[in-house]
Amino acid sequence: MEKKISLTVNDKPLNFTVTLASYNKYINELTHINKVAPARNFLMRSVDEDSKDALREIVDLPGFGVQLVGALLEEYMPDVNIIVGK
């Protein structure tokens, strides 16, 4: 699944192309003690060429990478209804 996602951050447009491969790589890189570097890597892998410079200006702000990944994944992941039976 590939999805193009456009976000505006601090009045700067950022365009991303998120793929299943990049999403899976991000999830596989996450550990209980390593979240910031995988978030930054996922953003830099997924950002479109026309938005790379704008992202580089802000990607290292404290907490920004994790926050932006959250917004991207919210748009990327399909809505599903899961009910746990007991």
Image (tube, rainbow, N blue to C red):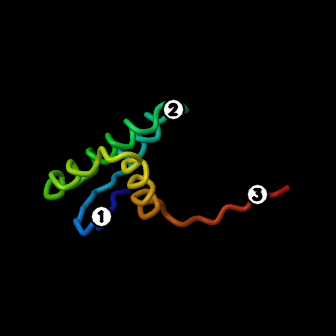
The spot of residue 76 in percent (x, y) is 42, 60
Please tell me which residue is depicted at 47% across the width and 36% down the height of the picture: 30
Across and down, in percent, residue 83 comes to: 73, 62
Classify 4 as above or below 18: below
Q: Is residue 58 left or right of residue 30?
A: left
Frontmost of labels 3 and 2 is 2
> Which residue is tagged 1?
9
Question: At 31% across and 66% down in the image, what residue appears?
Answer: 7
Q: Which structural element holds mark 1?
A: strand
Q: Quadrant of the C terminus?
A: bottom right
Residue at 18% in and 57% down = 51
Task: Check the image and report above or below for 29 versus 74.
Answer: above
Pick the front one: 1 or 12: 12
Type of the residue with mark 1: Val
Q: Residue furthest front?
A: 62
Going by the numbered disc 3, the residue's amino acid type is Val
Crowding around mark 2 (Cα neighbors within 10 Å: few <14, some 14 to 19, many 20+) is few
User: Which is closer to the viewer, label 2 or label 1?
Assistant: 1
In the rendered image, the quadrant that contains the N terminus is bottom left
Q: Which mark is residue 31?
A: 2
